[in-house]
Amino acid sequence: MSPLSPNHQLLPASEAVLGEGLTIRRALPTRLRRMVGPWTFLDHFGPTDVAHGDGMRVGPHPHIGLQTVTWLHRGEILHRDSLGSLLQIRPGQLNLMTSGRGISHSEESPDPRSPELHGLQFWIALPDHARHGEAMFDHYATLPVIERDGFTFTLMVGEGLGERSPARLFSPAVGIDAEVPGAAQTTIALNPDFEYAALVSEGEAAIDGETLRPGVMLYLGGGRDSLHLATTDAARFTLIGGEPFEAPVQMWWNFVARSKEEIVTAVTEWNAGRGAFGEVQGYDGERLRAPLPPWAQP
Ligand code: MN
């Protein structure tokens, strides 16, 4: 592996609207960068008014080859999965779903609910030794919180700031939420063996001197032992990092794999109701149908 070096690469997110007006900014993957360590997908959704209408409604769909990380700033999401999990997640809590060889789940706004929904969903690619294993769902109600120089850091996953998250990961990686009520600055320690990226979800923050707002992720490279953070007003941002991933991944729809053949198999099996995906009970709506990738169409 070539040694990592510090970098500044600005990655504009692509914007989409899901269902009834839930704005999604997709910061990973982008054309400029597919992964940051094992992090392979990052959606920043909202803030959206979900007081009226149905709110979030994502019907049963499958995953392979990844862990999903759900993290909320405001609001609630009701999670159901094929393992029988039925659970509401709230801000400050972590949902970590490990697909192993296959899982399916649905995500919806519960009733009653808070008027606003705002949060992040990440995917972490599973290394080869874990991607054929058992599916798992873990909910962490509390996580390590570190107060420093006016910043409140929450360690979502991995190790950092002298703490370790209880979340079960399969590759060396870290995910840190940072919240700050006003002007502040600090310097935090990083792992030089990790590559990192930062994403602002509220307000604005200067990360390593680069002023960021929602809609653009900053890839920071690696080989760094510290990072300077500064704000002039209230802000919220996330830092993700990890060792460069073991292999390039093949991604399509909700699947992370190593080959196009694995993707086609997953699409076919899910649509036929076969395979390791199981069934989601209790969701009031249709299961999603997997689209065939363009390169597999007749
Ligand atoms: Mn999903």
Image: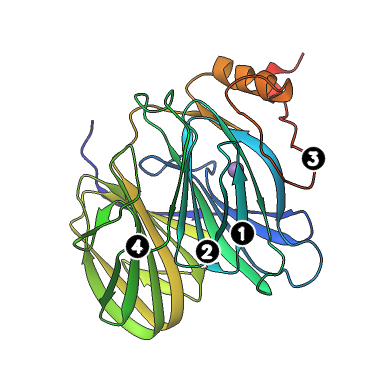
**Quarter of the image where one finds residue 149:** bottom left
Specify the label residue 143 is tagged with: 4
Q: Earlier in the sequence, mark 2 or mark 3?
A: 2
Q: Earlier in the sequence, mark 4 or mark 3?
A: 4
Which residue was labeled with disc 3? 286
What amino acid type is highlighted by mark number 2? Leu
Residue at image coords 26%, 46%: 194
Q: Earlier in the sequence, mark 3 or mark 1?
A: 1
Which residue was labeled with disc 2? 72
Mark 1 or 2: the one toward you? 1
Specify the label residue 165 is tagged with: none
- From mark 1 to mark 2, how far is it between C-alphas? 9 Å
- From mark 1 to mark 4, how far is it between C-alphas? 18 Å
Q: Secondary structure at mark 4?
A: loop
Residue 111 rendering spot, x and y as whole percentages: 72, 65
User: How many residues crowd around disc 2 within 10 Å: few (fewer than 14), some, or many (20 or more)?
Assistant: many
Report whether the residue tagged 3 is closer than 8 Å to ligand 1: no
Specify the label residue 77 is tagged with: 1
**Quarter of the image where one finds residue 39:** top left
Q: Earlier in the sequence, mark 1 or mark 4?
A: 1
Q: Secondary structure at mark 2?
A: strand
Position of the N terminus, as image quadrant, is: top left
The answer to whether the residues at label 1 and label 2 have Cβ atoms under 8 Å apart is yes
Q: Earlier in the sequence, mark 1 or mark 2?
A: 2
Above/below status of 109 relative to 73: above
Above/below status of 216 relative to 191: below
Residue at image coords 73%, 20%: 272
Foreground of the two, 215 or 278 = 278
44 left or right, relative to 222: right
What amino acid type is highlighted by mark number 4? Leu
